Each structure stands twice: as structure tokens, then as C-alpha cells.
Amino acid sequence: MNLKLYGLIVFLHIVSAVLAIGPLFIIMPIIRRLRSVERGVEKALLSVIAAIIRLVMHAGHALVVTGVILIVWGPWPWHTSWVLMTFFVLAVSAFFLATGFTRVLRDFDRLDVSKDELLNRLNKTAWLYIGLMLLILWLMVQKPMLW
Ligand code: HEM
């Protein structure tokens, strides 16, 4: 395929990676602040968190779509070990996390869910997500031949 177009897709892939990981680091200090603020401020901070999660989720989808295009059009066969490992880690992430963020977003509006419990869940999900993304980032950059 056209080398320039392939380069453009790699660029979009990397921009998506930045947007799919970076904003999550802002969530941690906001969570810490949220534990001790009054109702009005709380609502404003929660809407910032919701916006961050939405951005990260859209960027994550763009990341997978551009990644699949790179495999279909590019030089790397899908059965290369680092590509297979990426699919495996993504499948694990989808299993554990796909509903995690969506549920937190939904529970923000429920009065019967305790704020502390929700924030703990959000904190745990965010760190797990960052860990898995960094693992994939390592696979992408190093492209290790694992077998
Ligand atoms: C379905 C999932 C994915 C597939 C199929 C995929 C596929 C690829 C391929 C084939 C390349 C090599 C491009 C080239 O150098 O010719 C690449 C590069 C890259 N990917 Fe992914 N990717 C996926 C998910 C991700 C994720 C989740 C991240 C971030 C955590 C990511 C970050 C990167 C980065 C930073 C590069 C550039 C690395 C480099 O070439 O030095 N990718 N990806």
C-alpha cells in the first residue's frame, strides 16, 4: 500500500494512543479532591471525570481501528508474536474493563451507590487500564519476538 498513507495511519494510531492513555492520569488527583468537597463542586468534578472517560473510550476505539488497518495493510503478519500478544492483552482488557468505565459513568447518577465505593472502583479500574495499556505500549514499541 501507499507508504505515505501507511505513515499517516501510524501517526493517527500514535495520536490515538496518546489520547487513550494520557488523560487518565488527570483522573487520579481529581479523585483525591472529590473525597473532600461539597455537593456543588462534586458535580462539576464528576462531569470532568465523565468527559475524560468518554474521550479515553473514543480514543481507545480509534486505536484499535487504526491498529487493525495497520495489520491489514502493513508488513506485519497478524500471527507475529507481539501482535498476537496484543490481541490477547486487549481481549483480557475488554473482559475486565469494557463494562468497568461504563458502569462507573452510569452509577454517577444513582443515589444509592456510595461515593467512596464508586471512587475506589474508578481508581482501581483506571490503574488497571493504565497498566494494561503500558504493557501493550511496550509490545508495540519493542515488537519483541516472543516465540
Ligand atoms: C488491535 C490493537 C492494535 C493493533 C492491531 C496494532 C498494530 C500496530 C502495528 C502493526 C504497528 C506497527 C506500525 C509500523 O511500525 O509499521 C503499531 C505501532 C504502534 N502502536 Fe499499535 N496496535 C494496536 C493497539 C495499540 C495500543 C493499545 C497502543 C497503545 C497502548 C498502541 C501503540 C502503538 C505505538 C506507540 C506504535 C508505534 C511503535 C513503533 O513503531 O515504534 N497500539 N501498532
Image: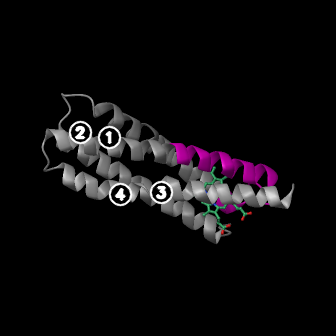
Q: Determine the image quadrant of residue 137.
A: bottom right
Q: Secondary structure at mark 2?
A: helix
Where residue 111 appears, as percent x and y from the top left, is: 19, 28
- Disc nearer the start of the sequence (4/1): 4
Q: Main secondary structure of the magenta part?
A: helix
Give 11 or 123, whichever is nearer the viewer.
11
At x 36%, y 41%, the residue is: 50
Viewer-side residue, 108 vs 68: 108
Characterize the local packing of mark 3: few (<14), some (14-19) or many (20 or more) Cα atoms within 10 angstroms: many
Amino acid, disc 2? Lys
Taking the image as shown, residue 135 lies to the left or right of residue 47, namely: right
- In magenta segment, residue 78: yes
Q: Magenta part of the protein: which range? A: 58-83
Q: CA distance from mark 1 to mark 3?
A: 19 Å
The reply to whether the residue tagged 2 has its Cβ within 8 angstroms of ligand 1 is no
| Helix, strand or loop for disc 1 | helix
Query: Residue at image x 70%, y 59%?
Result: 10
Distance Cα–Cα, label 4 vs label 1: 13 Å
CB contact under 8 Å: marks 3 and 2: no
Q: Nearer the viewer, mark 3 or mark 2?
A: 2
**What residue type is disc 4 on?**
Ile
Percent x, y of residue 68? 70, 48
